[in-house]
Structure formats: C-alpha cells, structure tokens
Image (cartoon, rainbow, N blue to C red):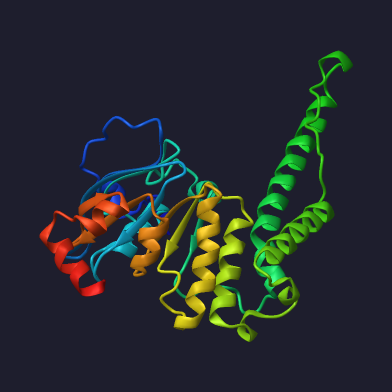
Amino acid sequence: MKNVKEKKVKAYKPKYLNKRTSPVEVLDPEALLEVQHLTKSYGKLKVLDDINEKIYKGEKIAVIGPSGSGKSTFLRCLNVLEDPTDGYVFFEGADLCDLKVDINIQRRKMGMVFQNFNLFNNMTVLKNITFAPVHVQTAELRKLKRINLILKLKNLFKKKSDKTPLLPVETSVKKIKVEAEENALRLLRRIGLEDKAKVYPSTLSGGQRQRIAIVRALAMNPEVMLFDEPTSALDPEMVGEVLNLIKSLADEGMTMVIVTHEMGFAREVATRVLFMDGGNVLEQGPPEKIFSSPENDRLKEFLSKVL
C-alpha cells in the first residue's frame, strides 16, 4: 500500500486580519484606547465605516445615536468581542487585532457590562464575582511554580555558586480565594447587597443583577469600563440605582465608554459625547455643546425626538 501523504493543515487566521488594508498611523502615546480606520461589515452591510477615535485615561465617553447606528458594534470592537473587518484597535499601545497579542491578557484590564447582565445562573453571587480573579491568579501561580520546578531541575546539574535563584512565591491557592472573597464582599457592601452573597442571580431583581454585573467587572481592577446600554433591560424604577453606581465610578476617575439612551445621564456624567449614525461618528464634543448647540442636522433631528 502506498504511503498517503498527510495534508498540511494551515493555522487558522481570522479573515479580518488578511483584509486589513488601511495603513497604521502614528499612535498617540497619551491615548489609553485608539482605533484607526475601524470598519466592520456583515456581508454587504457596513456597520462601521472607517472610524478614527482616541480615548484618554479618565475620560467618560457617552455614545449616543438611533438604534442600528453601530454604537454597540463600536463598543464591542474596542475589546475585539467583534472582529473588525478592517482597521486597528490599540489598547495601551498593543494592537488587539494582532494574533501575536494575547487578547485574554488585555481583556483582563477592560471591564465589560452587557445589556442582559450575563451572570452565571448556576453560581452564587459571590462565586460570580470571585470566579475570574481566582481563575486568573491561580493560573499565574501555577505558571510560577512550573518555572521554579524547571529551575530546580536545571540547578541539579550546576555548582552551588552557579545555581539560579528561584522566583519568590508569596501566595497560595487558599490565600487567593480568601482575598478574592474579601474583595467581593467589600464590593457588595458598596452597593448594599452584601446579604445577597450566597443567593443565585435568578432570585434577584434586574437592577440588583446589573449592579452585581458591574462589581463583577470591577473585581478585576480594570483600566477602563465598557457599558453596553446597561439600563435598557431594566424597569424604569430600577434604572436610577444602576446609573447612580456608574456615576460614583465616574466621580472616582474611572475611564469609561458607555452606550446609552439616557440623555440626562450622558449630559450629566460624560466628559465627551459621540453621536453615531450610519456607522459613522457624525459629531462629538462636550455634552453642553452636543445638547445645547449641535451642528449636525442629523443630530438636531435625533435630539428633537429624544429630549
């Protein structure tokens, strides 16, 4: 029987990486997040059209616009939950669309809050909040121990004077879990829900679940928070408690990008407002300018309907 030659399997590369035709421009070293020529298409439908934006540390960006304008897609491209068709997304100088960049490490520094909470219903509130930090820190501890094991084996064949010192291990799995739970309870106390630590999300109101989703993201100590219409799935009476929590984060200096239909909130909290329609940022500026003296005709029309 003739030997059958094995076919070489090419490594998978997302299609969008092969279509990035736009040139990379000089990065702004002061920008925390920067997108260049950001484009997103679904077949022939272009949802984002060559967007260039910079977000600086401490900014509170409100993204407003009609439904279907590309707001949520823009937000989800910032941490590459949506793969751009073309263009670049830089976070702290790292190109998140580059396969060489570990996107999971970068996402640890980018908190994301969704419309529908996305809590794990099979976990208690406490477990929801501690799951990610415990998982990440435990994985780092195991990596550190593996490195030390390799060093020990190599040191067996070295003279005492040539042995490589082991890396310090200052924690343990037990300590990681205890510290994560203490931090989770501190965050729950902040939102007045410490008594809900042992219950499951399905037993809570929408406002309570969304506040827990926010503190779950905060448990990872992110550099920036991304909010995708965090109040759209809530009853009107529950909206205030969620917005108050977001306002308190803004007052503490948290960098945030929030897609919202709450115009009063955008006017009060945002340092800059982006108005989107048709996959483009048609106008942007301080809230007082956007809401009091808009220049773009489409923005004027939009505000006349929502204010």
Residue located 54% across and 80% down the image: 206
Quarter of the image where the N terminus is located: bottom left
Closer to us: 75 or 235: 235
Residue extending furthest toward the top? 161
Q: Residue 129 placed where, x, y %?
A: 66, 65
Q: Is residue 113 left or right of residue 156?
A: left
Residue located 59% across and 76% down the image: 208
Q: Is residue 249 above or below residue 65?
A: above
Tell me, yes or no, if residue 118 can be seen here: no
Q: Is residue 107 left or right of residue 192?
A: left
Q: Residue 168 placed where, x, y %?
A: 80, 33
Closer to us: 25 or 232: 232
Q: Is residue 183 above or below residue 93?
A: below
Q: Residue 127 placed where, x, y %?
A: 70, 69
Q: How many marks?
A: 0
Residue extending furthest toward the bottom? 203
Q: Residue 156 placed where, x, y %?
A: 85, 27
Tell me, yes or no, if residue 80 can be seen here: yes
Residue extending furthest toward the left? 297
Q: Is residue 111 left or right of residue 201?
A: left
Quarter of the image where the C terminus is located: bottom left
Closer to us: 186 or 268: 268
Residue extending furthest toward the right? 160
